[in-house]
Image: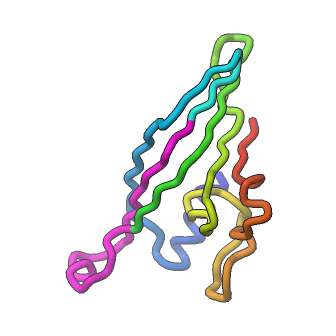
């Protein structure tokens, strides 16, 4: 629900995106007891709502990103595997717009939004059931 609301907010600011193409590559994996960890890379293209004329005039058709994740799954008593964490490694850059952080936080052009501080990015990027 928060992701949908965030998308609507972006749509109101700059038109949002018309589509996304995302590929996920597993770069490493491990299994220790009832905990499985995958190192993955999320590569995405977010397409802007542009006309063919806009693109011909030099506007970028899409923005591209590559984002490493460490995802952990815990085996449940019924044998199902449940995602227990998704830690994003955004490095020293800003948190990509595809990642939920603080609801309602926007960059109004006045510098980095609060959600892009390095101090708590790693903690915010963790998911819990």
Quadrant occupied by the C terminus: top right
- x and y, in percent, of residue 121 in the image: 73, 60
Horizontal side, residue 56 vs residue 38: left or right: left
What residue is shown at x 39% (from left), y 59% (from top)?
A: 45
Up the image or down, 27 lies above or below 59; here it is: above
Q: From the viewer's perspective, is residue 57 above or below residue 71?
A: below
Which of the 4 image quarters holds residue 86? Answer: top right
Where's residue 68, x and y in %? Answer: 55, 49
Q: Nearer the viewer, residue 2 or 81?
A: 81
Seen as rendered, the residue at the extreme bottom is: 110
What is the span of residues highlighted in magenta in the rendered image?
A: 39-62
Question: Where residue 23 appears, x then y in whole percent?
Answer: 40, 45
Query: x, y percentage for residue 1?
Result: 65, 51
- As displayed, is residue 37 above or below residue 101? above
Q: Nearer the viewer, residue 33 or 75?
A: 33
Q: Residue at x 72, y 68 (%)?
A: 115
Compared with 69, 2 (above or below) is below
Q: Between residues 58 and 71, which one lies in front from this camera angle?
A: 71
Q: Quadrant of residue 116?
A: bottom right
């Amino acid at each position: 629900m928060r992701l949908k609301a965030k998308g609507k907010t972006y749509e109101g600011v700059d038109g949002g995106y018309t589509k996304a193409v995302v590929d996920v590559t597993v770069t490493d994996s491990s299994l220790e007891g009832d905990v499985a960890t995958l190192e993955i890379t999320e590569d995405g293209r977010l397409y802007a709502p542009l006309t063919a004329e806009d693109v011909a005039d030099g506007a970028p058709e899409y923005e591209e990103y590559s984002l490493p994740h460490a995802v952990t799954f815990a085996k449940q008593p019924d044998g199902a595997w449940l995602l227990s964490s998704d830690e994003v490694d955004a490095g020293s850059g800003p948190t990509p717009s595809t990642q939920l952080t603080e609801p309602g936080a926007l960059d109004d052009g006045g510098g980095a939004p609060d959600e892009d501080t390095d101090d708590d990015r790693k903690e915010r990027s963790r998911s819990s059931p």
